[in-house]
Protein backbone atom coordinates (compact mmCIF):
# COMPACT_ATOMS: atom_id res chain seq x y z
CA UNK A 1 0.00 0.00 0.00
CA UNK A 2 1.48 3.27 -1.05
CA UNK A 3 -0.54 5.34 1.41
CA UNK A 4 -2.16 5.08 4.80
CA UNK A 5 -5.28 6.79 6.15
CA UNK A 6 -6.13 7.45 9.79
CA UNK A 7 -9.80 6.70 10.31
CA UNK A 8 -11.73 8.06 13.29
CA UNK A 9 -15.22 6.65 13.91
CA UNK A 10 -17.76 7.91 16.43
CA UNK A 11 -20.40 5.90 18.23
CA UNK A 12 -22.47 5.73 21.41
CA UNK A 13 -21.91 4.27 24.86
CA UNK A 14 -24.53 2.33 26.83
CA UNK A 15 -25.99 5.61 28.13
CA UNK A 16 -26.36 7.04 24.61
CA UNK A 17 -23.47 9.50 24.99
CA UNK A 18 -21.25 10.11 21.98
CA UNK A 19 -17.67 8.85 21.97
CA UNK A 20 -14.94 7.69 19.64
CA UNK A 21 -15.01 3.95 18.98
CA UNK A 22 -12.13 3.73 16.48
CA UNK A 23 -9.01 5.78 15.81
CA UNK A 24 -6.09 4.54 13.79
CA UNK A 25 -4.84 3.39 10.42
CA UNK A 26 -7.37 1.40 8.43
CA UNK A 27 -6.81 -2.26 9.28
CA UNK A 28 -5.79 -5.16 7.13
CA UNK A 29 -6.89 -7.22 5.35
CA UNK A 30 -10.43 -5.87 5.25
CA UNK A 31 -9.63 -2.17 4.96
CA UNK A 32 -6.81 -2.31 2.43
CA UNK A 33 -7.02 -4.03 -0.90
CA UNK A 34 -5.35 -4.13 -4.24
CA UNK A 35 -7.24 -4.94 -7.40
CA UNK A 36 -6.35 -4.67 -11.07
CA UNK A 37 -3.31 -2.52 -10.34
CA UNK A 38 -5.02 -0.09 -7.95
CA UNK A 39 -4.78 0.31 -4.18
CA UNK A 40 -8.05 0.70 -2.29
CA UNK A 41 -8.60 1.86 1.29
CA UNK A 42 -12.12 1.00 2.40
CA UNK A 43 -13.26 3.54 5.00
CA UNK A 44 -16.88 2.64 5.76
CA UNK A 45 -19.93 0.85 4.44
CA UNK A 46 -23.64 0.90 5.19
CA UNK A 47 -26.02 -1.89 4.29
CA UNK A 48 -29.40 -0.20 4.58
CA UNK A 49 -31.22 3.07 4.04
CA UNK A 50 -31.64 4.67 6.41
CA UNK A 51 -28.28 3.54 7.82
CA UNK A 52 -28.05 1.83 11.21
CA UNK A 53 -25.78 3.78 13.60
CA UNK A 54 -25.95 1.26 16.45
CA UNK A 55 -23.11 -1.06 17.44
CA UNK A 56 -19.36 -0.74 17.22
CA UNK A 57 -18.43 -3.32 14.58
CA UNK A 58 -15.97 -2.30 11.85
CA UNK A 59 -18.21 -2.00 8.78
CA UNK A 60 -15.26 -2.73 6.45
CA UNK A 61 -14.55 -6.17 7.91
CA UNK A 62 -15.75 -8.23 4.93
CA UNK A 63 -14.40 -9.54 1.60
CA UNK A 64 -13.88 -6.81 -0.99
CA UNK A 65 -16.75 -6.05 -3.33
CA UNK A 66 -16.75 -3.03 -5.64
CA UNK A 67 -20.41 -1.97 -5.36
CA UNK A 68 -22.16 -1.41 -2.04
CA UNK A 69 -24.68 -3.91 -0.68
CA UNK A 70 -28.32 -3.52 -1.78
CA UNK A 71 -29.68 -0.22 -0.37
CA UNK A 72 -26.22 0.57 1.01
CA UNK A 73 -23.20 2.80 0.51
CA UNK A 74 -19.42 2.49 0.36
CA UNK A 75 -16.85 5.17 1.24
CA UNK A 76 -13.31 4.55 -0.04
CA UNK A 77 -10.11 6.05 -1.41
CA UNK A 78 -8.56 4.57 -4.54
CA UNK A 79 -5.00 5.20 -5.67
CA UNK A 80 -4.47 4.80 -9.41
CA UNK A 81 -0.86 4.31 -10.44
CA UNK A 82 0.19 5.58 -13.86
CA UNK A 83 -1.41 3.47 -16.60
CA UNK A 84 1.98 2.21 -17.77
CA UNK A 85 2.42 0.58 -14.33
CA UNK A 86 -1.20 -0.45 -13.87
CA UNK A 87 -1.47 -2.22 -17.23
CA UNK A 88 1.63 -4.27 -16.42
CA UNK A 89 -0.25 -5.87 -13.49
CA UNK A 90 -3.60 -6.18 -15.21
CA UNK A 91 -4.37 -9.20 -17.36
CA UNK A 92 -7.64 -9.74 -19.12
CA UNK A 93 -8.44 -13.01 -17.32
CA UNK A 94 -7.42 -11.64 -13.91
CA UNK A 95 -9.48 -8.46 -14.40
CA UNK A 96 -12.55 -10.40 -15.59
CA UNK A 97 -12.34 -12.83 -12.66
CA UNK A 98 -12.02 -9.89 -10.24
CA UNK A 99 -15.04 -8.20 -11.82
CA UNK A 100 -17.25 -11.25 -11.48
CA UNK A 101 -16.13 -11.94 -7.90
CA UNK A 102 -16.50 -8.29 -6.86
CA UNK A 103 -19.98 -7.80 -8.32
CA UNK A 104 -19.61 -5.41 -11.24
CA UNK A 105 -19.86 -5.64 -15.01
CA UNK A 106 -16.62 -5.56 -16.99
CA UNK A 107 -16.74 -4.30 -20.58
CA UNK A 108 -14.18 -6.59 -22.22
CA UNK A 109 -15.12 -5.35 -25.69
CA UNK A 110 -14.08 -1.74 -25.09
CA UNK A 111 -10.68 -1.24 -26.70
CA UNK A 112 -10.22 2.33 -25.37
CA UNK A 113 -9.13 1.20 -21.89
CA UNK A 114 -8.80 -2.19 -20.19
CA UNK A 115 -10.52 -0.87 -17.07
CA UNK A 116 -13.97 -0.17 -18.51
CA UNK A 117 -16.72 -1.36 -16.16
CA UNK A 118 -20.20 -0.53 -14.90
CA UNK A 119 -21.87 -0.69 -11.50
CA UNK A 120 -25.50 -0.15 -10.54
CA UNK A 121 -24.60 2.85 -8.38
CA UNK A 122 -24.42 6.60 -8.15
CA UNK A 123 -20.75 7.41 -7.49
CA UNK A 124 -19.41 10.66 -6.11
CA UNK A 125 -15.76 10.81 -7.21
CA UNK A 126 -13.54 13.58 -5.78
CA UNK A 127 -9.90 13.88 -6.90
CA UNK A 128 -7.75 14.67 -3.85
CA UNK A 129 -4.30 14.23 -5.41
CA UNK A 130 -2.89 14.14 -8.93
CA UNK A 131 -4.91 13.92 -12.10
CA UNK A 132 -6.91 11.20 -13.80
CA UNK A 133 -9.06 10.96 -16.91
CA UNK A 134 -12.69 9.89 -16.52
CA UNK A 135 -13.57 7.94 -19.67
CA UNK A 136 -17.09 7.26 -20.93
CA UNK A 137 -18.14 5.30 -24.01
CA UNK A 138 -18.23 8.67 -25.76
CA UNK A 139 -15.78 11.24 -24.49
CA UNK A 140 -13.35 11.80 -21.65
CA UNK A 141 -12.58 14.54 -19.12
CA UNK A 142 -9.30 15.31 -17.39
CA UNK A 143 -9.94 15.62 -13.67
CA UNK A 144 -7.45 17.41 -11.43
CA UNK A 145 -7.19 17.89 -7.67
CA UNK A 146 -10.46 19.37 -6.44
CA UNK A 147 -12.60 18.16 -9.36
CA UNK A 148 -15.72 16.06 -8.77
CA UNK A 149 -17.59 13.63 -11.04
CA UNK A 150 -21.10 12.36 -10.38
CA UNK A 151 -21.02 8.98 -12.15
CA UNK A 152 -24.57 7.67 -12.64
CA UNK A 153 -24.45 3.96 -13.49
CA UNK A 154 -22.51 4.52 -16.71
CA UNK A 155 -19.91 2.35 -18.40
CA UNK A 156 -16.64 4.07 -17.48
CA UNK A 157 -12.92 3.75 -16.79
CA UNK A 158 -10.19 5.71 -15.01
CA UNK A 159 -6.96 6.47 -16.86
CA UNK A 160 -3.89 7.94 -15.18
CA UNK A 161 -1.68 9.17 -18.03
CA UNK A 162 0.73 11.03 -15.74
CA UNK A 163 3.90 9.76 -14.08
CA UNK A 164 2.51 10.08 -10.54
CA UNK A 165 -0.24 8.27 -8.64
CA UNK A 166 -3.72 9.82 -8.53
CA UNK A 167 -5.97 9.49 -5.48
CA UNK A 168 -9.73 9.66 -5.73
CA UNK A 169 -12.27 9.59 -2.88
CA UNK A 170 -15.42 7.66 -3.79
CA UNK A 171 -18.84 7.36 -2.23
CA UNK A 172 -20.87 4.67 -3.99
CA UNK A 173 -24.62 4.50 -3.43
CA UNK A 174 -26.71 1.54 -4.52
CA UNK A 175 -28.99 2.49 -7.45
CA UNK A 176 -31.49 0.97 -9.83
CA UNK A 177 -29.85 -0.51 -12.95
CA UNK A 178 -29.97 1.59 -16.09
CA UNK A 179 -31.54 -0.40 -18.96
Image: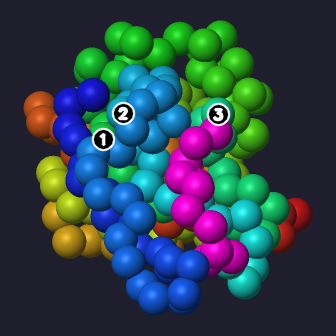
Report, in whole angstroms, how far the alpha carbon at label 1 lies from the one at label 2.
Answer: 5 Å
Query: In which image quadrant can residue 66 be found?
Result: top right
The mark nearer the N terminus, 2 or 3, is 2
**N-terminal-most mark, 3 or 1:** 3
Quarter of the image that includes the C terminus: bottom right
- Viewer-proximal residue among 97 and 107: 97
Label at residue 39: 2
Residue on which the image places disc 3? 63
Residue 151 screen position, x and y as percent: 54, 67
Q: Is residue 24 magenta?
A: no
**Does residue 170 appear to the left or right of 60 in the view shown?**
left
Please say if the residues under marks 1 and 2 sit with CB atoms less than 8 Å apart.
yes
Cα–Cα gap, marks 2 and 3: 15 Å
SS state under label 3 = loop
Horizontal and vertical percent position of residue 162: 16, 38
Instruction: Residue at 41%, 64% (x, y): give it.
Output: 21
Q: Residue at x 46, y 88 (%)?
A: 17
Q: Which stretch is magenta?
A: 52-62
Corner quadrant of residue 173: bottom right
Closer to the eye: label 3 or 1: 3
- Dominant secondary-structure state across the stretch colored magenta: loop
Whether residue 101 is visible, yes or no, is: yes
Dot 2 falls on a residue whose secondary structure is: strand
Which residue in the protein does label 1 denote? 79
Amino acid sequence: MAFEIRRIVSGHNAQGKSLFIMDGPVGTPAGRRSSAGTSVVELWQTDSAPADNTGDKDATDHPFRLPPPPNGTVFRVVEYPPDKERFATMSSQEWSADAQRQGYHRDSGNARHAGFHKTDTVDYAFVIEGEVYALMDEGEKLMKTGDVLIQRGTNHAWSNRSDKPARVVFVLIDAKPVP
